């Protein structure tokens, strides 16, 4: 129904005009002819320019549900990623984004995951499920510098022998996660800690001699589990609600894609593994 702004006082009319113009502008930014995804071209196992990542599969699912062609804007997920992609209106959605980041407007989360401890499947650390386990004392543990697990390693006195790997890199040229797993297999480190959606799929796809155990029992801050959403431009609430509807209606298919890839799925509160739907 049309709004006749002449019925309102001048000040309120100006506010309404601004709000309606802003809503129109926001709506116009989202493409109506393609499902435009912002993605890292070399962030395996999540996204890759050859379409092999599990986020690529999720993007394909949503493009099909929207009956739109899938279009990518590729840019390394490091400093400047949002500014050069989503904020520049080169694309309309980031498929995987941690809940609570102020650079984007988050959709509802569609999965919760946790860091994993990766060890040799037949080695002496195969039964370790927590960083407080005495078996880890004196061991060399690989960890991404500046990540949440690093604080827990300090708490348990494990940092002096730890080996750090870079967090913010251009993954077209550097592969910290792959290097960590290679070091583990070569015996240069005794264990590796990786974000579950990275470590779980990498181990499942290419490292049969390793095992990845979700770190569900860590206490204190920072937390080791995170809820993952899709990210859209700030203010695009209509687009966010549409994606929320797609998430809600296709949650079972999303779970299936993530499980097939090897992503450890947790309950919303991060207290245990999510059960498979009957």
Image (cartoon, rainbow, N blue to C red):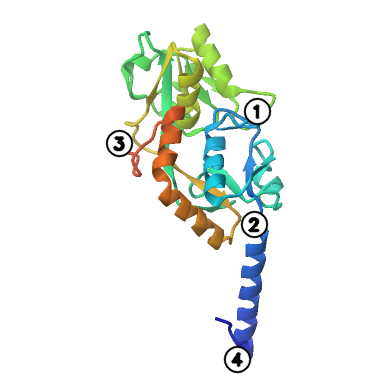
Look at discs 3 and 4 and give the one toward the viewer.
Answer: 3
Q: Position of residue 176 (x, y in %)?
A: 59, 23
* Image side of residue 237 versus residue 200, left or right: right
Q: Residues within 10 Å of mark 1 (few under 14, many from 20)?
A: some
6 shown above or below 159:
below
Q: CA distance from mark 3 to mark 4?
A: 56 Å
Residue linked to disc 2: 32
39 shown above or below 166:
below
Look at discs 1 and 3 and give the one toward the viewer.
Answer: 3
Look at discs 2 and 3 and give the one toward the viewer.
Answer: 2
Q: CA distance from mark 2 to mark 4?
A: 36 Å
- The earlier-in-sequence mark between 4 and 1 is 4
- 1 and 3 marks in contact (CB < 8 Å): no
Q: Position of residue 136 (x, y in %)?
A: 37, 16
Q: What label sits on residue 171 in the rendered view? A: 1
* Image side of residue 57 versus residue 174, left or right: left
Outermost residue toward the left? 278
SS state under label 1: loop
């Amino acid at each position: 129904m049309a709004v006749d702004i002449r019925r309102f006082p001048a000040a309120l009319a100006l506010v309404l005009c601004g709000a309606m113009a802003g809503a129109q502008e926001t709506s116009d930014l989202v493409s109506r002819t393609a499902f435009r995804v912002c993605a890292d071209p070399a962030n395996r196992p999540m996204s890759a320019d050859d379409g092999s990542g599990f986020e690529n599969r999720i993007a394909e699912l949503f493009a099909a549900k929207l009956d739109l062609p899938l279009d990518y804007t590729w840019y390394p997920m490091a400093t400047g990623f949002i500014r050069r992609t989503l904020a520049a209106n080169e694309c309309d959605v980031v498929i995987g984004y941690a809940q609570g980041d102020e650079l984007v407007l988050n959709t509802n989360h569609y999965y919760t995951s946790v860091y994993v401890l990766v060890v040799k499947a037949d080695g002496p650390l195969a039964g370790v499920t927590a960083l407080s386990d005495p078996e880890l004392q004196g061991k060399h543990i690989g960890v991404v510098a500046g990540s949440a697990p690093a604080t827990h390693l300090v708490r348990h006195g494990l940092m002096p022998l730890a080996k750090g790997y870079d967090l913010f890199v251009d993954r077209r040229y550097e592969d910290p996660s792959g290097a960590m797993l290679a070091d583990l297999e070569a015996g240069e480190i005794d264990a590796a800690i990786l974000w579950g959606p990275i470590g779980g799929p990498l181990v499942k796809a290419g490292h049969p001699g390793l095992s990845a155990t979700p770190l569900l029992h860590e206490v204190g801050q920072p937390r080791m589990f995170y809820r993952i959403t899709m990210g859209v431009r700030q203010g695009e609430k209509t687009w966010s609600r549409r994606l929320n509807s797609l998430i809600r209606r296709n949650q079972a298919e999303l779970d299936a894609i993530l499980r097939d890839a090897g992503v450890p799925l947790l309950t919303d509160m991060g207290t245990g593994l999510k059960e498979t739907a009957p």
